[in-house]
Image (cartoon, rainbow, N blue to C red):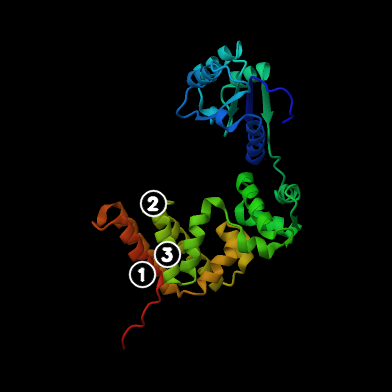
Amino acid sequence: MAADELRPAYLLLGSDRPKIRRALARLRSRVPAESVELLSADATPAVDAVAGCNALGLFGDEGARLVVVEGVERWRADDAEAIAAYLESPSASSVLALVAEGAIRQAALVQTVEKAGQVLRFDVPKPRDPSGWVRAEFERVGARADAEAARALVELVGDDVTELASEVDKLATWAAGEEIGRREVEALAVSAHDTFVWALTDAWGDRDCARALAACESLLERRTKEPFAIAAALAGYVGRVRAAQRLAHEGANAAEVARRLKIKDYPARKALGHARNFGPDELDAAVVRLAELDAALKGASRLAAELEVERALVDVTARREPAAA
């Protein structure tokens, strides 16, 4: 965003969320922090956002004021009309920044801002290999990463550019100028969506009961996930490991397991590694025990949900004692 005179309104949209965030940050940097008002379209109709712009203009202080509204793709036709009416005679001391998190259904809103302000579009091209975008991001932040590291990051995180950008920043900070390769990516990177799964499922797969309980307790204390979501994630991963183990017994290698289970190479290798720590009967028993947990969380038990999760976690993680002769 060029450092020219501020427009009355901006609309930031597109699939490249990191670039949208950076553009919004540059816009906010041109306005004093105390002069920024952050709103959500879910809770704020356009008439209220307009009222905020007009109210700010009444103070008479020097310098621009900024009203930011997130999620404007959820606004309706009457909201677009309110913005159009405001931009016919906008406040001279206010800037309205509209941020779309998805596709905008109200074309009139886009046309209105194009006429009176500026529409900033940031779209991610959809190449067959998103690792090219990842390598460009590594270069942008001054990090040294090879093509194999970029591919590994896409395999692990997926093609969501917001999550990829976050992991690129994290890896670049950690590396501090050192070379980043596949090994560093696999050791440090994780999908933001699945962070809570990895801490718990890795501990379960390693049969480390104390670490599994600590991860579970941490999630429950910070309310990162509810008991039912934790149980569902663990059950899903146990099912994956069980399926990977059966395929391995049929002679499938990691690449074949990844293809058959429709997952990336790295998660397939991880599941196969964990499968070696359990016998087939143990994984069968774990599936049954987690089904019992699901029933308990849905009302079959009077115990606290958190306690039910922890009891089941111990049962499916700890090594089973051999039966007495």
- Viewer-closest of 34 and 202: 34
Q: Between tags 3 and 2, which lies in front?
A: 3
Q: Which residue is mark 3?
A: 214
The reply, left or right, for residue 47 in relation to residue 128 is left
- Viewer-closest of 70 and 56: 56
Q: Which residue is mark 1?
A: 315
Residue 191 coordinates in the image, percent (x, y)? 57, 53
> In the structure shown, which secondary structural element does the residue marked by tag 3 occupy?
helix
Residue at position x 35%, y 63% in the image:
310
Residue 160 coordinates in the image, percent (x, y)? 61, 46
Measure the C-alpha gap from mark 2 to mark 1. 20 Å
Q: Check the picture and name the quadrant holding the N terminus.
A: top right
Q: Earlier in the sequence, mark 3 or mark 2?
A: 3
Measure the C-alpha gap from mark 3 to mark 1. 15 Å
Residue 218 drawn above or below residue 8: below
Specify the amino acid type for callout 2. Answer: Glu
Q: Quadrant of residue 10?
A: top right
Q: Could you classify mark 3 by the number of other residues whose Cα lies within 10 Å: few (under 14), some (14-19), or many (20 or more)? A: some
- Viewer-closest of 145 and 293: 145
Whether pointer 2 and pointer 1 mark residues with C-beta atoms closer than 8 Å, the reply is no
> In the structure shown, which secondary structural element does the residue marked by tag 1 occupy?
helix
